[in-house]
Amino acid sequence: MVAADDGTWSLDFPTLFVVPDWITRHCKLQSVGGLDPEPQPFVMYDWQLRITANLYRVKPTAELGQLAPAFHYRRAQAVAPQKSGKGPWAASIVAAEGVGPVLFNGWASGGERYRCSDHRCPCGWVYEYEPGEPMGRPWNKPLIQITATSEDQTDNTYRPLQEMIRNGPLSEVMKVGEQFIRLPNDGRIDVVTSSAQSRLGNPITFAAQDETGIWTEGNGMTKVATTQRRGLAGMSGRSLEQTNAWDPTENSVAQKTAETKVKDVYRYHRLPPKGLDYAKKSERRKIHTAVYNGSHHVDLDSIEGEAAELLEKEPAEAERFYGNRITAGMGAWLQQDRWDARLKRRKVPDGARIVLGFDGSDVDDWTGIRAETLDGYQFTPVYGPDRRPCVWDPADWEGQVPRLEVDTAFREMFDRYDIVRAYADPPYWTSEVAAWQATFGEKRVTEWHTNRVVQMHAACEQLLTDVTKKDSTFWHDGCETASIHVRNARKAARPSNRYVLRKASVLQKIDLAVCSVLAHEAAQDAIAAGQAAPPPKYYAYTA
């Protein structure tokens, strides 16, 4: 995942350089409101070229004849703000997938050429390969789907694609229709929505999936994504997602892609600087400047006007659309960017005085341990010879949390560190908590029931305050699972204007967020009891 960046990047891997060059030569668009009335070659912005280079990144071990396995990434995701240029760029990729040199065709010795005349295109363009460069060729029979929740949504990609074809040499090899485009050898590009069930099961070579941040179980688009990927797998094809930032309460296709653990998915999401408040106009301008960097057609004053108006009624939506941040709607406990702004890693040596927070499950939710030093640094400890993080997803353990592993890890913490307090939520784990109390003492291991409204509300508010206040000394290790679980947590209202934490949805977990609350509460109580010790001078934070 690419987060905030300064706009610089190095291209130190083999890729089909021929693809962006082919696009510039063949794809032409007329600027909207521009001074030049003639269609101009589509030249990618730096961020678009970056994603394209990674989408067509070739494995050094690639062999002639391989299709998708020749490439480093099976699919890609681009998360960019509204009006930044996602649609026309995706259209250019679809055009290339239709009749361009997008398949690996061996390694060049030097002097080999790609000639358009060899592929029914009369434009006369020739590309000469450098020695060692991967070469490209078109699909024999490309079958492509442009997919969105509605036909209006597919227009974001389909309309600029139609224009690119009509404005240049592609009109000689691609025949434009209202709902599909004919390609050589009976290939075609179809526009598809969730209602087109008959087309969704078809084998395809490429899928352009538009605005996957609103593809959910509720509108049937999660099934569409799964079905399309099956069709791609059958043809050794690949896909591209493009989307605005999503609402993390909806468990969208975009969110699942962003959170996947597999290594063959390229994800690009330029995040704004941490700690800026989108509600403040001056800081909002800094956010827009960062996330629209490189999209030269964008007028930030116009973006500000749209964002300010939307901010009045839908602040979370405005921040997602124009600030490119993953922001929850009403009821969010702690916005993820505020949590992420407290990231500052450091090493915690064995023997350090710390506290623990434990939340356990059995077959559904996750089980985890978070630790915190008494000067405010929170982290997920590791255990065992493999240094595994103390996070257990039942799905990784044949559907049930490995109780012996958890017990071993918890006891190892007491051997490695000076544990002064450990707060454990006992449901499902009463026997283990009792055994830990018998071994380490009830003053060190405490049953801390999270269903107590008054105490849980106060503990959540304490952590929320210490994360968000400007002069906070609270920092954390950037544990990805903890970050996701914090983002998923919602306020469940209780009497007397209090709340406890609940999940954003059944599928989204919050267990590491609960562990964080418990660890921080244990740390505050230990400090109040005079158990804090001065931190060693050799503690050093890193970015």
Image (cartoon, rainbow, N blue to C red):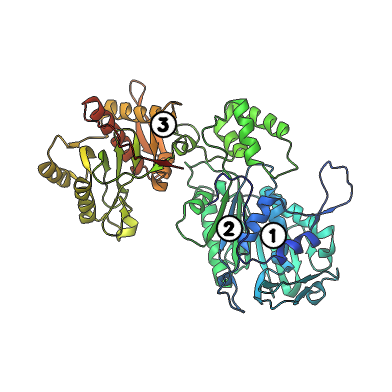
User: Which residue appears farthest toward the right when viewing the image?
Assistant: 37
The CA distance from mark 2 to mark 1 is 12 Å
The CA distance from mark 3 to mark 2 is 33 Å
Residue under label 3 = 467
The CA distance from mark 3 to mark 1 is 42 Å
Residue 543 percent location from the top left of the image: 46, 43
| Closer to the camera in the image, 520 or 343 | 343
Query: Can the viewer see residue 505 in this picture?
Result: no
Q: Quick one: label 1, few (<14), some, or many (20+) residues within 10 Å?
A: many
Q: Residue 417 appears in which quarter of the rendering?
A: top left
Residue 376 percent location from the top left of the image: 34, 33
Mark 3 vs 2, N-terminal side: 2
Q: Is residue 214 left or right of residue 498?
A: right
In the image, residue 80 sits, relative to residue 267, either above or below, namely above
Mark 3 vs 1, N-terminal side: 1
Give the residue type at disc 1: Ile
| Closer to the camera in the image, 256 or 285 | 285
Residue 100 percent location from the top left of the image: 73, 68
Q: Quick one: label 2, few (<14), some, or many (20+) residues within 10 Å?
A: many
Residue shown at the point (75%, 77%) measured from the top left: 112
| Closer to the camera in the image, 214 or 448 | 448
- Mark linked to residue 307: none
User: Which residue appears farthest toward the top when viewing the image?
Assistant: 496
Residue under label 1 = 93
* Secondary structure at numbered mark 3: helix
Q: Is residue 217 left or right of residue 516?
A: right
Query: Can the viewer see residue 519 in this picture?
Result: yes
Residue under label 2 = 76
| Closer to the camera in the image, 7 or 187 | 7
